Amino acid sequence: MAKAVESSGELGTTSPRPLFAGLSDISISQDIPVEGEITIPMRSHIREFDSSTLNESVQNTIMRDLKAVGKKFMHVLYPRKSNTLLRDWDLWGPLILCVTLALMLQRSSVDSEQDGGPQFAEVFVIIWFGAVTITVNSKLLGGNISFFQSLCVLGYCILPLTVAMLVCRLVLLAEQGPINFMVRLFVVIVMFAWSIVASTAFLADSQPPNRKALAIYPVFLFYFVISWMILTFTPQ
Amino acid sequence: MAAVDDLQFEEFGNVTTTPAENPDATTINIEGPDESPMHQPGPPRGSGGEEDDELLGNEDSDKTELLAGQKKSSPFWTFEYYQTFFDVDTYQVFDRIKGSLLPIPGKNFVRLYIRSNPDLYGPFWICATLVFAIAISGNLSNFLIHLGERTYHYVPEFRKVSIAATIIYAYAWLVPLALWGFLVWRNSKVMNIVSYSFLEIVCVYGYSLFVYIPTAVLWIIPQKAVRWILVMIALGISGSVLAMTFWPAVREDNRRVALATIVAIVLLHTLLSVGCLFSFMCFGVCLSWTWHLLQESSGRADGMAPPSGICKVSH
């Protein structure tokens, strides 16, 4: 009762009928059972989700991950400002691309002593250590992107260069010559520009505005070195 | 409660007092980002005032000292500690690069551009770019020389990139360490007005290497005389930046020690530039040498593999 009077006092009006007036008339008797079920919808949803991924077939799991990777490939090929690469990052795509690129850059030479080209391990190390260095650099400059998100973006944006490698290998099956080289040069330059545009579209927003160029330049250098490795690839 | 009459605003009139007019007044000098790097108090002075200018920077050197004292407060095992070394904006990096390309006599690179905000971004990425520029230009130059030959087989040399990287990064970090140690030792004997921190020295060395990047690209031109002229020009520019930076630090010392220090700095820099030129030529020449050797020994089974470490400069 006192509470009701106070609340009416706050309103500043002398209302004739205070709030909760009828409450005092209700008496809770002991013989009304209070029972029921309290379910938290979120928890039951998660429990259901867990059991569903645990019991599903292997094909479902693989297809789901492959579809996620494929969806991200599409985002790289048609770069728009979207958060898909950043939100659900995964490192499967970069691993597939890196292994493919390193395998294709492998030379079929038997005698490896005059071979100055990159071995599988060298390509792998260049790509992953380059990506880690760029990520650490962008974080040190004050970017607010997480470590693995940045690795994910940089790895996925190697996709155009992998396509360029495929095209170069096909072109190299034809006769060697200056036209051959010009075609390869053109393809590599176009794909290099595509990689830069794609990664800039995803990474630029996470940098402080007055340091964007400082964060993007290492990305440029990274893709330039990879493009150089692709362009100078000659099969034995 | 004070009466209303006591609350009166005092008119200060025109508040723009400069330190020259009224030395006792405290003025706050708020500079925007466009003004701060090139802020010089007044027109360039004659040779008499140059000494003070290059020693003390300009009037807000004590302000930057205060700011420097507030900056590095995180312990060294946190990430924030290392973030303080990357606290530069794009225009600041460009200004520093520009300052390393255009050494003006009398202007100290450290006091003018770094101003107690040394960064590690410039030295690290300039060295990385230099390594790749030398490697790629070396390969490209050799490729262009042998463009018409059908027997030429182009192979990129990635093993040498790691050697070049080691040398350049070692130069950019170990020589500043040695120089800093030497200057600290001399400072304990002779009181110098100007002293540099280790990071500032690393910064100067890193930015002074920038001039070698366009030089490496221009080294594609296959004329020997052109290459040596380019080396001389690059050495002149970066050597003068280094000499003008470190001269005020050793000037107070014994004449011979000061001169010896400056000569040692320039000599090491000369070694580096000649080393860069030789590694550039090595990127191409070793390759063609090994290829000719292979052609000669193409009849043999194996075993006559040329050691790829030997570099024979043929031209």
Image (cartoon, rainbow, N blue to C red):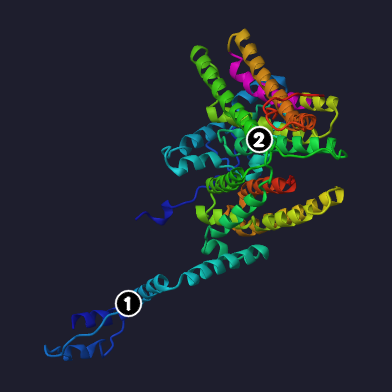
Secondary structure beneath label 1: loop
- The chain that hosts pointer 1 is A
Image quadrant occupied by the N terminus of chain A: bottom left
Q: Position of residue A136 (x, y in %)?
A: 53, 46
Q: Position of residue B184 (x, y in %)?
A: 51, 19
Alpha-carbon span between mark 1 and mark 2: 60 Å
Q: Position of residue B52 (x, y in %)?
A: 63, 22
Q: Is residue B234 magenta?
A: yes
Q: Name above or below for residue A31 compared with residue A97.
A: below
Q: Is residue A47 left or right of residue B262?
A: left
The total of numbered circles placed on residues is 2
Q: Is residue B86 visible?
A: yes
Q: Name above or below for residue A202 compared with residue A31.
A: above
Q: Is residue B146 magenta?
A: no
Q: Would you call the spot at circle 1 few (<14 residues within 10 Å), some (14-19), or many (20 or more)?
A: few
Point 54% across, 51% down: residue: A143
Q: Which residue is mark 1?
A: A40
Q: Position of residue B105 (x, y in %)?
A: 72, 24
- Disc assigned to residue B161: 2
Image quadrant occupied by the C terminus of chain A: top right
Q: Is residue A83 visible?
A: no
Range of magenta residues: B233-252
The amino acid marked with disc number 2 is: Val
